[in-house]
Image: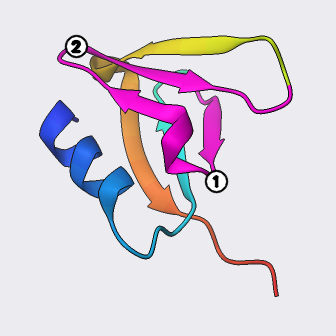
Amino acid sequence: MNQKVLTELFGRQPFQPLKINLISGDFIEIRDPKLVVPMRTQVFVAFPGEDRFKLVWLGHIESVEAIQAIG
């Protein structure tokens, strides 16, 4: 995964929620693209309503997939 691909995915309009799957088996759901900042070697993810954030190395991202909209 690289910064350019992530920037494109999180910049799509209309935005569709995404799930970042990590090589550890963990995942992070992204429902608001304004809470994500792809950087050169890491991606910054803020968690709404919480005083925490996560820095993820791009090399630890296994895949990114769309989350089905809840209807």
- Magenta part of the chain: 25-49
SS at mark 2 in the image: loop
In the visual, does 42 lie left or right of 26? left
The answer to if 41 sits in the magenta stretch is yes
Residue name at image x 71 percent, y 28 percent: 47
Q: CA distance from mark 2 to mark 1?
A: 22 Å
The amino acid on which the numbered mark 1 sits, given as a three-letter code, is: Arg
The amino acid on which the numbered mark 2 sits, given as a three-letter code, is: Thr
Compared to residue 27, the image places residue 10 above or below, namely below
Query: Dot 2: within a 10 Å radius of its alpha carbon, few (fewer than 14), some, or many (20 or more) residues?
Result: few
31 and 67: which is toward the camera:
31
- Label disc, if present, on residue 41 of the rendered structure: 2
Q: Is residue 53 visible?
A: yes
* Residue indicated by mark 1: 31
The answer to if 2 sits in the magenta stretch is no
Query: Dot 1: within a 10 Å radius of its alpha carbon, few (fewer than 14), some, or many (20 or more) residues?
Result: some
In the visual, does 60 lie left or right of 59? right
Residue 61 is drawn in which quadrant? top left
Percent x, y of residue 12:
33, 66
- Which circle's residue, 2 or 1, is located before the other in the chain? 1
Residue 68 is drawn in which quadrant? bottom right
SS at mark 1 in the image: loop
